Image (tube, helix red, strand yellow):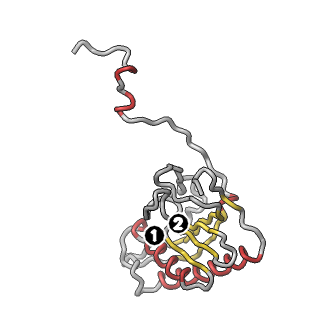
Amino acid sequence: MSPANACSLSIQEMKPDLRVVKQISVVLDEVMSQLNSSASVIQGIPRINEVSSHFEDLMRELLNKTSGLTCDFPKTSQGRLQRSGYPDLELIDQESHRVYYLDPKLYAIGSRDSSFRTFYFEPKIATNKVREDAVHFIVGFEHEKPAADRHWKFTRWDLVDLSHFQVKLKAEFQGSNRDMYRPEAIVATSVK
């Protein structure tokens, strides 16, 4: 499917979607339980930005162990694996063949009402990983401020259907110096 044709589908109160949401929910409970453990690989990591890939990896592992689901890192339109950028995971329900995109976000307690930008998607042709009509989910994991020993404690998760997401569009014109200083565009210049 071409990126131009891919769209976000609303989750339906139908058997496949309800079943998959329940399966995802079980996995998210287990992800929080494992990563909150004092033996978890994330404990002692100093910055929250360095923790998120561990959520992606564990979600992928546990979703793949869930009967009837396959989960992987989505590939770009050029077939390349790229971990950065939206979405982080592509989940396929084997029974319905429905695709679900998942993107975990970690946020601090008290920041749910923040107006700072926390979601960004730029549909570039070469690096676009949204290639199927799919249900799009953000998985928000809330965390406490880390203790002095850098122990991370996650307190809740939310599965957000992005078909209800209200976005702001930032249209921008951009170009490089090569684009700007083309000889035919220069109308005057200094004498040297």
Q: Residue drawn at (63%, 53%), measured in percent from left and top?
A: 5
- Camera-side residue: 26 or 16? 16
**121 shown above or below 98:** above
Which quadrant of the figure contains the N terminus? bottom right
| Dot 1 or dot 2, earlier in sequence | 1
- Camera-side residue: 145 or 48? 48
* Amino acid at the residue labelled 1: Ser
Task: Pick out the residue farthest to the top.
Answer: 191
On the image, numbered disc 1 is attached to which residue?
A: 52
Q: State the image coordinates of residue 74 (x, y, percent, origin top left).
A: 51, 66
**Count of picture labels:** 2
Q: State the image coordinates of residue 134 (x, y, percent, origin top left).
A: 64, 63
Q: State the image coordinates of residue 184 (x, y, percent, origin top left).
A: 38, 20
Indicate left or right for 7 with 108 as reference: right
Q: Residue drawn at (72%, 62%), measured in percent from left and top?
A: 10
Q: In which quarter of the image is residue 13?
A: bottom right
On the image, numbered disc 2 is attached to which residue?
A: 105
Q: Residue drawn at (65%, 56%), measured in percent from left and top?
A: 7
**Disc 2 element:** strand
Q: State the image coordinates of residue 43 (x, y, percent, origin top left).
A: 39, 79
- Camera-side residue: 117 or 11? 11
Which quadrant of the figure contains the C terminus? top left
Q: How far apart are labels 1 and 2 at the CA level? A: 7 Å
Q: Residue drawn at (40%, 21%), measured in percent from left and top?
A: 185
Indicate left or right for 72 with 19 as reference: left
* Amino acid at the residue labelled 2: Lys
